[in-house]
């Protein structure tokens, strides 16, 4: 009698193999995601939670008075923007929110806004800030 399973037997074992590989891959993926999430939560547990600060907070020693600024120097509220000239998120914030902030708070004398360059992207950020200030640093 001839072998009846022939090609269909090979096809079903191939399908079983593919399903096994997919299930194994999903188990590995879920394990990695679980590990990464648990590692992140343990990294943060010893850090202070600054959202729990109640009452007045004064940033003593923060030298911002000589930074570029907009607004009335006599206003009581000082806002310091830390941004990078090469940061795409900083640029998007500037384009999206700055006109409204200026109209509602700076032009009305409610706040004085200071800008502090916080170069965190890479050497390009430092070079960009030097060009804005007119420095002749190493390129």
Image: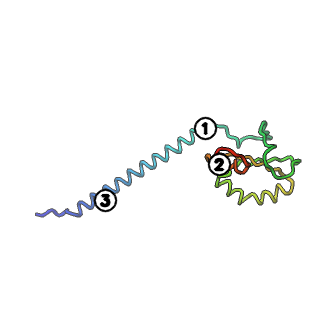
Total tally of numbered discs in the picture: 3
Residue 68 vs residue 72, the one in the foreground: 68
Task: Give residue 52's position: percent from left, percent from top.
Answer: 71, 41
Is the residue marked by circle 2 packed among few (<14), some (14-19), or many (20+) residues within 10 Å?
some
* Figure quadrant of residue 10: bottom left
Is the residue marked by circle 3 packed among few (<14), some (14-19), or many (20+) residues within 10 Å?
few
- Cα–Cα gap, marks 3 and 1: 46 Å
Q: Earlier in the sequence, mark 2 or mark 3?
A: 3
- Reading the image, the residue beneath label 1 is 45
- Cα–Cα gap, marks 1 and 2: 32 Å
At x 61%, y 38%, the residue is: 45
Residue farthest left in this picture: 1
Query: In the image, is residue 26 above or below residue 49?
Result: below
- Reading the image, the residue beneath label 3 is 15
Identify the secondary structure beneath mark 1: loop
Task: Give residue 58's position: percent from left, percent from top.
Answer: 79, 39
């Amino acid at each position: 009698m001839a072998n009846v399973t022939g090609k269909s037997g090979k096809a079903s074992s191939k399908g079983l193999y593919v399903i096994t590989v997919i299930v194994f891959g999903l188990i590995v993926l879920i394990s990695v995601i679980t590990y990464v999430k648990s590692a992140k939560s343990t990294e943060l547990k010893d850090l202070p939670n600054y959202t729990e600060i109640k009452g007045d907070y004064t940033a003593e020693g923060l030298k911002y008075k000589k930074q570029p600024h907009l607004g009335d120097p006599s206003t009581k509220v000082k806002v310091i923007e830390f941004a990078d000239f090469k940061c795409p998120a900083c640029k998007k914030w500037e384009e999206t929110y700055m006109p409204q902030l200026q109209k509602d708070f700076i032009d009305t004398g409610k706040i004085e806004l200071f800008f502090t360059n916080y170069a965190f992207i890479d050497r390009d950020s430092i070079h960009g800030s030097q060009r804005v200030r007119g420095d002749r640093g190493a390129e």
